Structures are given as structure tokens and as C-alpha cells.
Amino acid sequence: QVQLVESGGGLVQAGGSLRLSCAASGSVSSITTMGWYRQPPRKQRELVARETGGGSTYYADSVKGRFTISRDNAKNTVYLEMNSLKPEDSAVYYCNMYLYYNLRWTDYWGQGTQVTVSS
């Protein structure tokens, strides 16, 4: 069974930095897209950053120039480096992977990690 395990969230002051990690456990054959989403309180989940595996990346306008997504394919891990954090970045952050396991491609989600940015 595949699980995505996140780490790295926490409380930080505005202007600070955090690094989120998300590792896929289990016998994963291949992973294409890796991404990060977030859900602020009382709002819908939104895409923050995504990396397709072919070197193509996407960033939400609100995080461009501040956040960087990267991946380590050998470790089945995706990272999100967050700099110059703002209070509006506060949310539960979820990692997402589209991976091949048990003879099929499926979307998997992490359990979520809380990021709180104080002003």
C-alpha cells in the first residue's frame, strides 16, 4: 500500500522560511506529477506548485518568486521550499502524486501539514 508522508510544517514569523517534504512509501513503480496544494481556513483547496517530471513546473501567481518545488526521484520525495512567508500563506498544505502502483496510475494525497505564519 502506498502512503504519502509529509513533514516540515509549523509556526513561523512573517518573512521566515519553511521547507516541506513529502515521501511516498511502498512499492511505487513510477511517479509523474508531484505537487503541493493548500487549503486556508474556510476556503477551497488550491494548487500551489506542481512539477510534471519532465522538468515543467507551475506556480500559483501568489507564490511565484518565493516558493520552489523540487523532487528527488530516487527517494520518491517532493519538497516545497517556502521563503518570505506571509500571513496569507497560512493553510494546511497537502502533497499530491500521480503514481503507478499495483498495475495502475492513481492520484495519492498526503495527510496534510499545518503552516501558520504570524504577522
Image (cartoon, grey):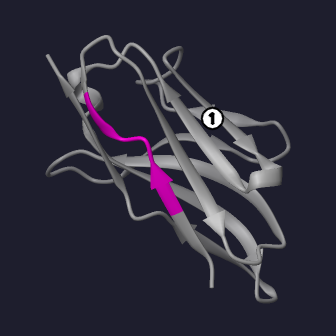
Give the x, y percent position of residue 64.
52, 20
Closer to the camera in the image, 33 or 29: 29
Give the x, y percent position of residue 56.
77, 36
* Image position of 32 (left or right of 49): right
Dot 1 surroundings within 10 Å: few (below 14), some, or many (20 or more)? some
**118 inside magenta stretch:** no
Q: Residue at x 72, y 69 (%)?
A: 99
What amino acid does circle 1 point to? Tyr
Closer to the camera in the image, 20 or 32: 20
Residue 98, placed above or below residue 27: above
Give the main secondary structure, helix, strand or loop, of the magenta stretch.
strand
Residue 46, placed above or below residue 25: above
* Image position of 38 (left or right of 12): right
Residues rendered magenta in the picture: 5-11
Q: Residue at x 21, y 24 (%)?
A: 87
Residue 61, placed above or below residue 107: above
Image quadrant occupied by the C terminus: top left
Image quadrant occupied by the N terminus: bottom right
Where is mark 1, residue-wise?
Answer: 58
> Residue extending furthest bottom?
102
Q: Residue at x 40, y 64 (%)?
A: 111
* Image position of 75 (left or right of 37): right
Give the total of numbered labels: 1
Label 1 residue SS = strand
* Image position of 93 (left or right of 116): right
Closer to the camera in the image, 43 or 98: 98
**8 inside magenta stretch:** yes
Picture quadrant of residue 18: top left
Q: Residue at x 69, y 35 (%)?
A: 57
